[in-house]
Amino acid sequence: NKWFDISSRSAFLLLHQCFKSMFEKTLTKEEIDKVFKNEKIKYQAVFSQVPSKKVFDYDYSLSNLMVASMLLKDKDLGKKLIETFELRKSEIPYSSMIERLEISNKGHLNLRVTDEYLKTILKLWIDSYSDSDSYDKDNERSKYLIENLKFQDDKDLNETERENKLLPIKNKKVLVDFASPNMSKELHVGHLRSIALGESICRILEYMGHDVERISHAGDFGTPLGIVLAHSLETKADYLKHIQDPTCKSNEPIIPTPKELSQLYTTSKNRTKTDEEFSKRTLWTAAQFQKGPPIYDDVDGKQIGGSDPIVYNAWLALCEASRIGFNKVFKMLDINVNERGESFYRDMLPGVIDELTRLGFVDISEDGRKCIFLDKTKDKESQVPVVIQKSDGAYLYATTDIAAIKHRVENGRQWVIVITDDSQSGHFQQVFKIAQDAKWLDRNETRVDHLSFGVVRGANGQKLSSRDGTPIALVDLLHESIERSKQATSLSKSFTRSEKLDITQNANNVEINRLLDTFENNNDNNYNDILNDEKHFQKIGMGALKYYDLTHRNNPYVFSYDSILSFKGNTSIYILYCYTRISTLLRRIDFNNLNLNPNLTEFKEFTEKERNLIFIMSRFSDVMKNTEQSLKPGVICDFLWDLSNSFHQFYEAEKIIGSERQDQKLFICLATQRILSTGLHLLGVETVEKL
Ligand code: ARG
């Protein structure tokens, strides 16, 4: 009686089992092994299920029998499987979940789920809080999430009631390394990618019950900082005054803005190209702060170790100044991440190098660098080694990353996810390989993923940049997106009569309805309040950027506000539009005060549009499991897009308010809205009540 615990993917596994028993009676032992012990086929059987295109009235089409015979290169076996199915299909133990099962002459297995199953799915989303152990975990968490999203009717729950709703769930200790900007540089659009993806992955894994640690592996340790610091110290930059001149009265140092900092970086960097003396000093400076805090003798107070104190304090000041800028942007984007920069691993580095040396991995080059040659099959001359220490003792990006993976595994992380642009794929392959060779990392025990993303291009096809070729600061992009979202959303427009006519004559239903909603909104008393509410547009603008980015996770994309903020296509605006339509509807009927009691047994047989919509809802837990494995939040975007499309079709074709099935339809709307808000939240997109 707990069949509704089973997501449709699990149901297919179950089906697989059914088949096994059915075929066991007909096929030889060898044939059985060939089909059922083949991992690839099992995989196909489970994953090749695609929602069918609804050509016939089937919900799923499973190609495994055909795929099986193809993969096994054994046509006869495929035929035999199909014949067996035809012969023995009456023996298949149908669950209350499957209404019909049929095999096409091409070997596709078509399946239709029962309405009873769909009703249960609906129930999972409309019953906000009932007896907690009668629901599957996914939904329990959905409800928790919904509570966190502060649904109106949840407000009167107290803390313990909220907590009791959480079921114990399988728990992996995950570390997600994202955002990770370099100190003294301004955040740019590449960081948007890392931030959007990282935050969403964290939310998804938390939702799936994992214990997630969010880490920003900030670049606070490398030579670039040596460059900026050497220059700043020499030119006696304002922000270091209190450090360089202790008698200086101004105890409030003047903190440079992110723009000034990145300007400083460019200026200093350019100097290294022409000024050799300066160049040397930058290296010395980096090697200094890498030694860590100065250490003094207890007795005579003389320095006995660590960095030069002025350099060290200047380094602290520079990092702090950068951090202020980063945090502002993080806050705007509503992300939560803890800084644990490269310097965190400082004290582990000598030990790591010693151990690698003991293991015989380390070669010293002619110019004194410590190198690791990874390819044992090639001679050293023909490969580029991983350098882990320079001749002056300075450490490199690879050194801290090797220490980081070691530290993360030692501290019990069972899954490590690092997010950077795709130029770093090689780097992480090397880092993981070294950690494996050293037996610090066992990939059977610990899952490690490097998630990479491509560049964001401008309209000219080149990497997105401002007119002078420098990268566009992320903060500017965010502000512009907020401004544009004001123009793009209908609230800020009041259509003239001729515009209205123009749109109604040319547009599809969605457009017309949007227009009508707009008129409704414009007559609303709160209209002006919303227009002046900066937060409202911040939600829309940030959400749109993140959502668009996530739909393009693996690919480079061309940045265009028009596409990002469009009401057409798979954008957050389109999804939010669906969401707000439901809000408007529920508000119009004062849903919260109707106190309807969902009694599913009284539900009328679903109309086709209702059924299509609820069928999409039923895929939610599959979508979540898929996303958890593939780490592609874009899968959720696609799902929400399907759901919204299906909702619009339902909404436009069927009368809701005043229909004899009003209650049933309102519940379907409510369920849709809850899934939308859950999904959007997982993508890091905040909902708004009006658009
Ligand atoms: N700071 C680096 C950058 O801006 C990203 C760091 C990513 N994380 C890591 N463990 N290396 O490219």
Image: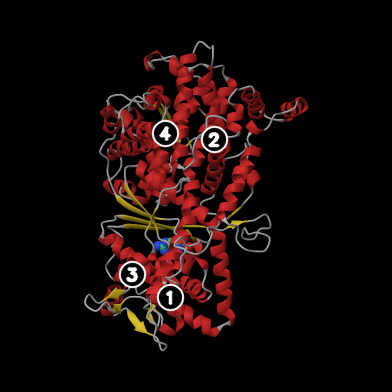
User: Which amino acid is tagged 3?
Assistant: Arg
Of the residues under marks 2 and 1, which one precedes in the sequence?
Answer: 1
Q: Earlier in the sequence, mark 1 or mark 3?
A: 1
Eye-nearest disc, 2 or 4 = 4
The residue tagged 4 is 149
Residue flagged by tag 4: what amino acid is it? Leu
Q: Secondary structure at mark 2?
A: helix
Give the label, 4 or 3, closer to the camera.
3
Which callout, 1 or 4, points at the residue further toward the start of the chain?
A: 4
Outermost residue to the right: 498
Q: Which residue is mark 1?
A: 286
The residue positioned farthest toward the bottom in the image shown? 366
Frontmost of labels 1 and 4 is 1
Q: Would you say residue 143 is visible in this rendering?
A: yes
The residue carrying mark 3 is 346
Dot 1: element: helix
Spatial distance from mark 1 to mark 4, Cα to Cα? Answer: 46 Å
- The quarter of the rendered structure image containing the C terminus is top right
State the image quarter where residue 221 is shown. Answer: bottom left
N-terminal label among 2 and 4? 4
- Going by the numbered disc 1, the residue's amino acid type is Ala
Q: Is the Cβ of the residue at disc 2 closer than 8 Å to that at disc 4?
A: no
